[in-house]
């Protein structure tokens, strides 16, 4: 889990904290590739991404990307990492995506996007990246075979697309928006399939394919909204803590981890 206040990634096994990986300044996101046995970090305060192997005391390779990288997505087949850069409104044309050749540990391309980026996912079946843009409210799509350009743009009918995840089995994207709306859409066509109210302004979302549940982290008032993705009905609201919006889902989907910033703890929920 990315521990921004500690400039570190914290590693857990079940209910046990194992170790931290330090010196990742302002780390905003952490992404694990099981296929490549690599971990990626977006180090927002130093404009880099980190690339390293699992385990304690890894050798971290840092690659300079755009301004304030945040969301990450990875194409294992092409060894291509997308870093979605938040940018700086005072710096023209700083809202960008950086495409990193992980094999070469070098930037392959940079793509300007129309607004501040949020979270990103990769669909290996379609071979495309999806990236939320806050304003205008759109998802930009990048074809991994043409990683230097935007392939298409999908309009989202709610302000501030933020958290994003994909159900590969049904071809649906789940997009949690700052307007307090969860939008479900068909990934290929962009057709809006469903809209549901949320209990506040969301951050990250995680799709649990084993349970067919979606978890939406909401920092204020400090809850997680849980949806059944079979019918997109809200089935639970879990109390966390005000300001809690950093979460991680275990690979088997049996545990959800949540940082509790006020009490300096990590909560572990069985799904």
Image (cartoon, rainbow, N blue to C red):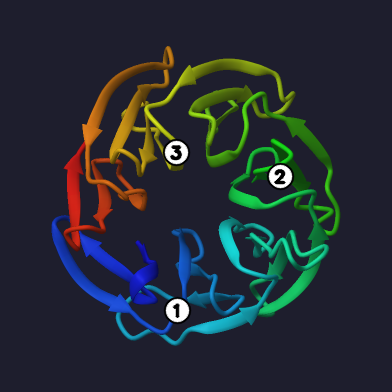
Sequence-wise, the earlier of marks 1 and 2 is: 1
Instruction: State which quadrant residue 225 falls in.
Output: top left
User: Nearer the viewer's eye, disc 1 or disc 2?
Assistant: 1
Residue furthest out toward the left: 15
Task: For marks 1 and 2, give the CA distance.
Answer: 28 Å
Q: Give the residue at x 27% y 46%.
A: 242
Q: Which residue is mark 2?
A: 128
Can residue 249 be seen from the camera position used here? no
Q: Position of residue 201 (x, y in %)?
A: 45, 37
The percent position of residue 266, horizontal first and vertical second, equals 20, 57
Residue at 32% over, 50% down:
243
Pointer 2: residues within 10 angstroms few (<14), some, or many (20+)?
A: many
Q: Which mark is residue 202?
A: 3
Q: Give the mark nearer the N terminus: 3 vs 1.
A: 1
Q: Nearer the viewer, residue 124 or 204?
A: 204
Residue 234 found in image quarter: top left
Q: Earlier in the sequence, mark 3 or mark 2?
A: 2
Q: Nearer the viewer, mark 3 or mark 1?
A: 3
Mark 2 lies on a secondary structure that is strand
Residue 24: mark in rendering: 1
Which element is circle 3 on?
strand
Q: Nearer the viewer, residue 21 or 159?
A: 159
* Residue 81 to residue 243: above or below: below
Q: Nearer the viewer, residue 15 or 140?
A: 140
Disc 3 to disc 1: CB gap under 8 Å: no
Q: Residue at x 23, y 63 (%)?
A: 12
Q: CA distance from mark 3 to mark 2?
A: 24 Å
The quadrant of the rendering that contains the C terminus is top left
| The N terminus sits in image quarter | bottom left
């Amino acid at each position: 889990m990315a521990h921004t206040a500690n400039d570190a990634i914290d590693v857990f096994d079940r209910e046990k904290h194992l170790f931290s990986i330090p010196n990742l300044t302002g780390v905003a996101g952490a992404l694990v590739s099981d296929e490549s046995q690599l971990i990626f970090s977006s180090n927002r305060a130093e404009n880099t991404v980190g690339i390293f192997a699992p385990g304690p005391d890894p050798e971290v390779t840092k690659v300079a990307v755009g301004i304030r990288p945040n969301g990450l997505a990875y194409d294992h087949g092409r060894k291509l990492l997308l870093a979605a850069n938040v940018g700086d409104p005072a710096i023209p044309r700083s809202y960008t995506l950086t495409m990193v050749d992980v094999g070469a540990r070098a930037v392959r391309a940079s793509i300007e996007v129309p607004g501040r980026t949020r979270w990103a996912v990769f669909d290996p079946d379609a071979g495309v990246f999806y990236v939320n843009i806050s304003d205008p409210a759109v998802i930009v799509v990048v074809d991994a075979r043409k990683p230097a350009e935007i392939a298409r743009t999908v309009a989202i009918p709610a302000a501030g697309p933020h958290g994003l995840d994909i159900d590969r089995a049904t071809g649906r994207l789940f997009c949690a928006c700052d307007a307090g709306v969860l939008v479900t859409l068909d990934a290929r066509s962009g057709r809006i399939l469903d809209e549901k109210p949320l209990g506040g302004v969301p951050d990250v979302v995680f799709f649990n394919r084993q349970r067919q549940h979606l978890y939406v982290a909401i920092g204020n008032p400090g809850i997680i909204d849980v949806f059944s993705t079979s019918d997109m009905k809200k089935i639970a609201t879990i109390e966390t803590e005000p300001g809690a919006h950093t979460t991680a889902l275990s690979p088997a989907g049996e545990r959800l981890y949540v940082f509790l910033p006020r009490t300096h703890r990590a909560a572990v929920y069985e799904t």
